[in-house]
Amino acid sequence: MVAVTFPDGASRQFEAGVTGFDIAKSISPSLAKRTVAMALDGELVDLMKPVRKDSRIEFVSRDDPRALELIRHDAAHVLAEAVQELYPGTQVTIGPVIENGFYYDFHRAEPFTPEDLPVIEKKMREIIARDAPILREEWDRDHARTWFIAKGETFKGELIDSIKSDEPLSVYKQGHWLDLCRGPHLPSVGKIGAAFKLMKVAGAYWRGDSTKPMLSRIYGTAWATQEELDAYLHRLEEAERRDHRRLGREMDLFHFQEEGPGAIFWHPKGWTLFQSLVSYMRRRQKAAGYAEVNTPQVLDRALWETSGHWQTYRENMFVTKTEDERVFAIKPMNCPGHVQIFKNGLKSYRDLPVKIAEFGVVHRYEPSGALHGMMRVRAFTQDDAHIFCSEDQIMDEALKINDLILTIYRDFGFDDVVVKLSTRPEKRVGSDEAWDKAEAALGRVLDELARRGLKTSIQEGEGAFYGPKLEYTLRDAIGREWQCGTTQVDFNLPVRFGAFYIGQDSEKKTPVMIHRAMFGSLERFTGILIEHYAGHLPLWLSPLQIVICTITQEADDYAYEIAASARKLGLNVDVDARNEKITYKVREHSHAKVPVLLVAGKKEAAERTISMRRLGSQQQTQLPINEALAQLAAEATPPDVRG
């Protein structure tokens, strides 16, 4: 007999080998009907798995968030079955669950095209309607390899060879079709439901190796309900409409080209927006007690060896050798340079904390396939800062950083923020003792933030190689999450560089180094802002705030007079006095996302008024020109200046 304990603490005895389905059925037939899997001692497993020892059990229904991964995994298997029914001779390789869906890679002489997707999706729905049970079997390794090779599945044979010899080899059957898989899975294919859609096709090398065969990859998405699927597809449509690359062209902000992969060519309007972010952050940092510095772009290899970057980050660095055989690297991070500034001149405990900040341009090598507009680049600017302090100052400084970050995000329209603690990775520098202290310090900060009502979580193994960190993840207007700000506690770098201050006991002490960024990458934050606002930037951020459009040439002088007055108030303004219809002008500037259009004709010039039209509105407001400009100047004042 085995004792099974349920979430409410109740316990019952069953024969050893009883399945989760049998246990659920013994409690209630309706429970068995709605259950699709179980958590056995915390591990999600098949409902038909035998229970052979005393265990804790929790039944998982289809609407449980944990079941979504099973729905997607089973959808990948049904996709593979549908492809092999429709296109005999196609080899299946791997089909994992990914964020928001799944994919499966196929080996086929003729790659799939988007036109194939509706046909495959229709076949998938037929297979799901059959509702074949999904059954797990354990196979002998040699038998499995022989069976798959005989079926022409050479990729499966290679996968079998890569599985550890002491690991059970499991096969899942659904009807007459089967696949090599670890599981778990739903009880039957019908449990997948109808809320799925095939999205796109792409090429992918077998095991990501360009020396191996090119496969044809089909991506899909699957959800528990049709409402969730519809919401996801709507988010995708919104994301496409808000894509910063498209809006960047429409708003004439920037462009990319092949000669500078992963680097941005800023146009005048885009650079104005970028500098607005710099000016804002510069004001906020100065008010918070940071001193701005600047460090070299190119530094000798020896410095990067001392910092540990050469050993742990070399593959991401741009390196060059000069004629005199010296090896240099373009900085991927600003931290080592800031330690050099701290070390220059004797520091006392009375000087702590020392806060230095830099809008530092850094370069990191990202694979070509990973580059994505402004969101994933090779050259970017960090609003980077480092605080050198004592151990007993860590919590106070981290909380000050937290308060600053949250008020900054609110100024830019982000109120939904999650703080995540990322702990030590496998690849790291420093002693376990140093990591213990750093993680304990940030753990106390996280506890305090949770006590204050912030949403928090822990990400095991996701810290930087030199220290754990708090990551600030914000949610945008369509629900996407973006990790931006960080607070990292580092006991290692100051030691490696021999940084010290004189303590109260007149002895040398090693400072703690807190790494801090709030926007993170200014380029990426700009892209996030563009997409968050769908290009409709707040007036204070817009690089071109006003365009004055004339209806007739008789209003041209009046328009230029208004523009001069607006510029004196600090507003960014252009005049459109072209001989075009006013409807054409309005349409063109609205497409370019200009927030405010001021329309001037003969009547407005005579009465010294203006017609004001806001982006996205069909309404026009008639105002005296001085009143209109005063209103716009107040609205265009940055929130930190406005108070």
Image: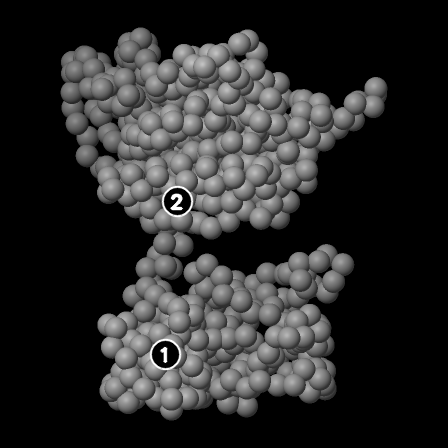
- In the image, what residue occupies the spot 62% across and 18% down? 296
Of badges 2 and 1, nearer the viewer stands: 2
**Relative horizontal placement of residue 46, taking residue 108 as reference (left or right):** left
Closer to us: 320 or 637: 320
On the image, the x and y values in percent for residue 135 come to: 49, 86
Q: Secondary structure at mark 1?
A: strand
On residue 405, the disc is none
Q: Secondary structure at mark 2?
A: strand
Q: Which image quarter: residue 133?
A: bottom left
- In the image, what residue occupies the spot 61% across and 75% down? 167
Which residue has dot 1 on it?
Answer: 36
On the image, the x and y values in percent for residue 179 come to: 58, 80
Name the image quarter holding the N terminus.
bottom left
**Relative horizontal placement of residue 33, taking residue 249 as reference (left or right):** left
Which residue has dot 2 on it?
Answer: 420
Closer to us: 547 or 254: 254
On the image, the x and y values in percent for residue 371 come to: 58, 43
* Residue 578 makes an appearance in the image: no
Residue 156 higher or lower than 16, as above or below = above
